[in-house]
Image: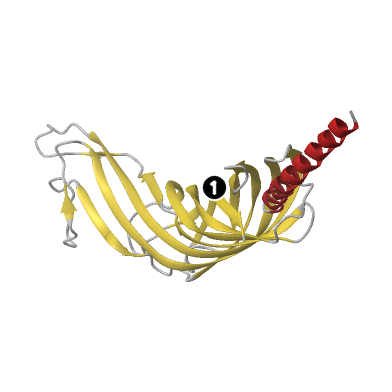
């Protein structure tokens, strides 16, 4: 009996010696995974995360301006357009629930403007002296590209489990204007059998029913630097066991400077952006 009891204890000890190293290795692997998890609040979080940014923007150009001097056209009050952006971000985790996020992005912020001229009654040859209404519209299509540098302060305020957080972020933005072009035309909408008189010899289209005042020309007086303030909401979603973090968000960029030095032309933007970052 004693011999059987001794053999049993010997078997237990041998099994323990075989199992303990495996358990230790598993525990070490688990701890390493947790330490690399930036969304796990129970473990030390990494101090640096880096990754790409991309998204779409909705641009709102406002003000009372004429983009071309000397052109008989009304003032453009507002214009809108969809653009895109992409770049690189980093996140420096400096506290338990807050961090600093610098980013550099290339952005396209176009705009389309349309304004109607007052209708006028005109006499056409062959109309029998009966006046007809004349309708003319003026449109401008703008391309506008920026290289932006921003520094955002992020504060988390909602945490759900280990893989989802919600935060607010805001900060200043400085942009180098890489380019800005304008195409501006006037269209004779009615009457359909009329044509523009063109004493200045401007380029035309649609059999003389469109006058082209500017065709992909530089925006006159375009400023080379732009400043703005940006703020918004974003979520943090852990992917692939939190090896990669996705940050979908919506932000508003409020322009502090004008697009040109000649006109009262402002640009504000809503940005639908997604960041991806991983710990380093």
Residue farthest toward the top in the current orientation of the protein: 1
Neighbour tally class for label 1: few under 14, some 14-19, many 20 plus, Cα within 10 Å: some
Q: Give how far across and how far down residue 236 sits, in percent.
A: 64, 44
Vertically, is 260 above or below 157? below
> 57 or 12: which is nearer to us?
12
Q: Is residue 150 left or right of residue 106?
A: right
Q: How many marks?
A: 1
Q: Give how far across and how far down residue 133 sits, in percent.
A: 26, 35
Vertically, is 154 above or below 149? above
Residue farthest toward the left in the current orientation of the protein: 126
Answer with the quarter of the image where residue 128 lies.
top left
Query: What colour-coding does the image apply?
Result: secondary structure
Q: Is residue 23 left or right of residue 132?
A: right
Circle 1 is placed at which residue position? 274
Residue 153 seen in render: yes
Q: Quadrant of the C terminus?
A: bottom right
Answer with the quarter of the image where residue 212 lies.
bottom left
Q: Quadrant of the N terminus?
A: top right
Residue at the image position 36 percent from the left and 42 percent from the top: 118
Q: Element under label 1?
A: strand
Q: Give how far across and how far down residue 130 sits, in percent.
A: 18, 31
Vertically, is 90 above or below 135? below
Residue 197 seen in render: no
> 117 or 46: which is nearer to us?
46
Residue at the image position 11 percent from the left and 39 percent from the top: 125
Residue at the image position 90 percent from the left and 32 percent from the top: 2
Q: Is residue 268 left or right of residue 35?
A: left
Residue at the image position 48 percent from the left and 69 percent from the top: 223
Q: Is residue 27 left or right of residue 199?
A: right
Q: Give how far across and how far down residue 190 sits, in percent.
A: 23, 37
């Amino acid at each position: 009996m004693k011999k059987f009891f001794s053999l049993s204890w010997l078997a237990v000890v041998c099994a323990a010696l075989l199992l303990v190293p495996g358990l230790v290795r598993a525990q070490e692997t688990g701890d390493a995974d947790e330490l690399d998890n930036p969304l796990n609040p129970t473990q030390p979080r990494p101090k640096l995360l880096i990754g790409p940014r991309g998204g779409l923007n909705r641009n709102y150009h406002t003000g009372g301006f004429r983009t071309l001097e000397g052109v008989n056209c009304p003032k453009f009050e507002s214009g809108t357009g969809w653009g895109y952006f992409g770049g690189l971000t980093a996140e420096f985790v400096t506290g338990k629930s807050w961090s600093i996020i610098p980013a550099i992005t290339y952005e396209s912020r176009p705009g389309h403007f349309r304004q109607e001229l007052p209708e006028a009654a005109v006499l056409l040859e062959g109309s029998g002296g009966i006046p007809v209404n004349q309708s003319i519209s003026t449109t401008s299509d703008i391309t506008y590209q920026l290289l932006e540098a921003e520094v955002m302060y992020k504060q988390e305020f909602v945490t759900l489990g280990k893989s989802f957080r919600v935060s607010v972020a805001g900060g200043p933005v400085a942009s180098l204007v890489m380019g800005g072009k304008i195409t501006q035309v006037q269209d004779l909408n009615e009457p359909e059998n009329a044509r523009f008189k063109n004493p200045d010899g401007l380029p035309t289209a649609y059999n003389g029913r469109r006058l082209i005042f500017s065709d992909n020309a530089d925006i006159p007086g375009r400023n080379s630097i732009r400043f703005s303030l940006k703020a918004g909401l974003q979520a943090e979603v852990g992917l692939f066991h939190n090896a990669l973090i996705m940050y979908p968000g919506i932000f508003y960029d409020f322009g502090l400077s004008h697009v040109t030095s000649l006109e009262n032309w402002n640009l504000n933007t809503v940005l639908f952006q997604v960041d991806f970052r991983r710990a380093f």
